[in-house]
C-alpha cells in the first residue's frame, strides 16, 4: 500500500493545485489558476499530502500567527476521503499555532463537515456560550 507523506516545505505547483481543487469541485478557485497559486504561496503555512509524489491533500492557514489564524482551505482528493489524511493535515497545519487565541474557519453547511470540525475541537458559533456575531462579505 502506498504511503502518504506530509510536508510543509515544498509548495505544490500551479497545475497540481488546479487538479486537486477541481477534484473536490472548488471551481471558484480554479477559474483563475494564477490567483490560486499566488494565494497559496502567500499563506502563513501550507501542509501538503502526497502519495507517490502525487498531491492528494492540502491545508493552508492565513493570518498573523500570533492573535488569529484562519484555516482557509483543507481539501483531500475524493479517492483519499475517510483515510485520516484530512485529520493529519488539520493537525499539522495548526500545530505551530496552538497558543493562538482565535482559530477560525468558515465552511459549507454539510453534516459531515460539522462532525469533522467538532471532532477536531472546533465549536460552531451558534453553539457557543457567549453571543458572537460573524460578518462576511463575498464578492
Image (cartoon, grey):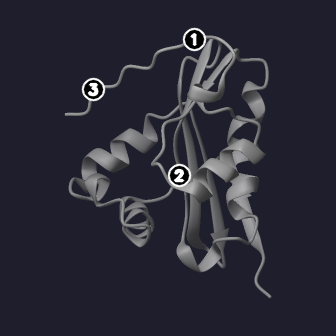
* Distance (Cα) linking label 2 and label 1: 39 Å
Counting residues from the start of the chain, the first of labels 2 and 1 encountered is 2
Element on which disc 2 rests:
loop
Q: Nearer the viewer, residue 138 or 1?
A: 138
Residue 14 appears at what percent x and percent y? Answer: 37, 59
The quarter of the rendered structure image containing the C terminus is top left
At numbered mark 1, what does the secondary structure look like: helix, strand or loop? loop
Foreground tag (1 vs 3): 1
Considering only vertical position in the picture, is 70 above or below 40?
above
Residue 92 visible from this viewpoint: no
Query: Which residue appears at 61% of the width and 59% of the height?
Result: 112
User: Is residue 128 rendered to the left or right of residue 99?
Assistant: left
- Per the image, the residue denoted by label 1 is 131
Residue corresponding to mark 3: 137
Left or right: residue 69 versus residue 23 is: right
Number of the label disc, if any, that sits on residue 123? none
| Residue placed under numbered mark 2 in the picture | 11
Report the mark closest to the observer, 2 or 3.
3
| Label 1 CA crowd tier, 10 Å (few <14, some 14–19, many 20+) | few
Disc 2: CA contacts within 10 A as few (<14), some (14-19) or many (>=20):
some
Query: How far apart in space, not on screen, are marks 2 and 3 (Cα)?
Result: 29 Å
**Residue 134 in the image, given as x and y percentages of width and height:** 44, 20
Proximity of marks 2 and 3: CB atoms separated by less than 8 Å: no
Q: Which comes sooner in the sequence, label 2 or label 3?
A: 2
Q: Residues within 10 Å of mark 3 (few under 14, many from 20)?
A: few
The one of 119 and 104 positioned closer to us in this rendering? 119
Q: Is residue 59 above or below residue 15?
A: above
Residue at the extreme bottom of the image, as rendered: 1
- Residue lying at 37% horizontally and 19% vertically, measured from the top left: 135
- Residue 89 lies, in percent from the top left, at 69, 52
Amino acid at each position: 500500500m502506498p504511503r502518504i507523506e506530509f510536508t510543509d516545505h515544498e509548495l505544490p505547483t500551479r497545475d497540481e493545485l488546479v487538479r486537486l481543487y477541481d477534484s473536490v469541485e472548488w471551481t471558484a478557485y480554479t477559474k483563475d489558476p494564477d490567483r490560486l497559486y499566488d494565494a497559496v504561496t502567500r499563506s502563513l503555512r501550507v501542509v501538503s499530502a502526497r502519495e507517490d509524489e502525487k498531491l492528494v491533500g492540502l491545508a493552508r492557514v492565513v493570518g498573523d500567527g500570533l492573535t488569529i489564524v484562519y484555516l482557509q482551505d483543507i481539501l483531500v482528493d475524493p479517492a483519499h476521503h475517510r483515510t485520516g489524511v484530512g485529520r493529519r493535515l488539520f493537525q499539522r497545519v495548526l500545530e505551530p499555532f496552538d497558543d493562538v487565541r482565535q482559530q477560525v474557519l468558515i465552511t459549507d453547511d454539510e453534516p459531515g463537515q460539522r462532525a469533522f470540525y467538532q471532532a477536531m475541537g472546533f465549536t460552531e458559533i451558534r453553539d457557543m456560550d457567549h453571543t458572537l456575531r460573524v460578518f462576511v462579505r463575498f464578492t
